[in-house]
């Protein structure tokens, strides 16, 4: 399947994405620095993460979080899909 959905869990992408946000994703190899993606760290292949592409390295990517206060796994990751848009919630309450 080339198009799919994922649900964000955790605070690593705040303020861009909040826990509970739902995303439409597309499987593709056409990505570039700055894109939001769904990826797997090579050191933790069972963990699926939503992160921002920071830098290409070793035929994979280094990822970054938008939230500077959250630490998480690091290392080279392989991109599974690119985030196209957030579809839920339609409007965020502040």
Image (cartoon, rainbow, N blue to C red):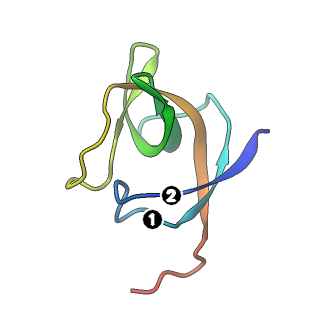
**Residue 18, percent across and down?**
43, 66
Mark 2 crowd level (few <14, some 14–19, many ≥20, 10 Å Cα): some
Mark identifier at residue 65 = none
**Residue on which the image places disc 1:** 19
Tell whether 51 sits left or right of 5.
left
SS assignment at label 2: loop
In the rendered image, which quarter contains the N terminus? top right
Q: Nearer the viewer, residue 92 or 29?
A: 92
| Pointer 2 or 1: first along the chain | 2
Circle 2 is placed at which residue position?
8
Name of the residue lying farthest toward the bottom: 93
Query: CB atoms at circles 2 and 1 under 8 Å apart?
Result: yes
Q: Residue at x 46, y 58 (%)?
A: 9
Secondary structure state at the residue bearing disc 1: loop
Q: Position of residue 87 (x, y in %)?
A: 63, 67
What's the residue at 58%, 49% (across, down)? 83
Q: Quadrant of the C terminus?
A: bottom left
């Amino acid at each position: 399947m080339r198009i799919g959905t994922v649900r964000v869990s955790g605070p690593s992408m705040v303020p861009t994405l909040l826990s509970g946000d739902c995303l439409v994703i597309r499987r593709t190899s056409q990505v570039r620095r700055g894109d939001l993606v769904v990826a797997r760290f090579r050191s933790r292949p069972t963990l699926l993460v939503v992160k921002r592409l920071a830098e290409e390295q070793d035929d994979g990517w280094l990822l970054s979080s938008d939230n500077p206060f959250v630490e998480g796994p690091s290392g080279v990751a392989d991109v599974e899909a690119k985030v196209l848009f957030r579809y839920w919630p339609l409007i965020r309450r502040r």
